[in-house]
Amino acid sequence: MNRRRFFQATGATALALSLPFSAQAMEADKQVLIDAAISSNHGHALSLSIGDVVEMLSKTKQGQNQEISIQGQSGHPHSVSLNQEMLLALLIDQELEVESSVDAGHSHGVLINLEVVTS
């Protein structure tokens, strides 16, 4: 899928056409990584690839939120819910801060970062 078709499929605005990582990520010696910091963490983890974000964007086109588990090694679940606006914000701003679900009597702040790195 080319960039124009991607933005048409996801309903993204013209503003999104200037994604900061897009030109950089196309260079052969660079890659896009997604990292997350989870507050008061005790074994939770978030694992996403740029492909996952693109796939979630296509699914949120109809207004559906995407639930992502951050349970990791912890003995109890948590998840974060991301909508199309949030996913686009991650791609445009390269950072997204969300609150996890409440499970086992607590929640976690989750800071998701998109980073372009040189291989």
Image: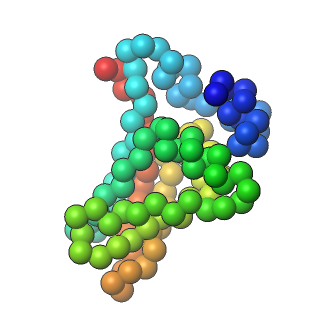
| Relative side of 81 to 114, left or right | right
Q: Is residue 54 left or right of residue 78?
A: right
Tell me the quarter of the picture where residue 78 sits.
bottom left
Identified at 76% across, 36% down, the residue is: 8
Looking at this view, is 62 or 43 the one in front? 62
Work out whether residue 109 can be spotted: no
Query: Which residue, as the protein is rendered here, is positioned at the far top?
Result: 28
Looking at the rendering, in which quadrant would you find the N terminus? top right
Which colouring convention does the figure follow?
Answer: rainbow
Q: How many marks?
A: 0
Of residues 28 and 105, the one nearer the viewer is: 28
User: Is residue 43 rendered to the left or right of residue 97?
Assistant: left
Identify the residue shown where x is 37% and y is 26%: 117
Residue shown at 53% from the left, 44% from the top: 53
Position of 118 relative to 99 (above/below)? above
In the image, residue 94 above or below residue 75:
above
Look at the picture and state if 19 lies above or below 118: below
Residue 101 percent across, percent down from the top left: 45, 74
Residue that extends furthest to the front in the rendered view of this protein:
1
Q: Quadrant of residue 92?
A: top right
User: Residue at 40% of width from left, 20% of height from top?
Assistant: 30
Percent across and percent down for residue 25 are: 48, 23
Measuring from the top left, give residue 83's x and y in whole percent: 62, 58
Q: Is residue 19 visible?
A: yes
Q: Position of residue 46 (x, y in %)?
A: 36, 55
- Assign the C terminus to one quadrant of the image: top left
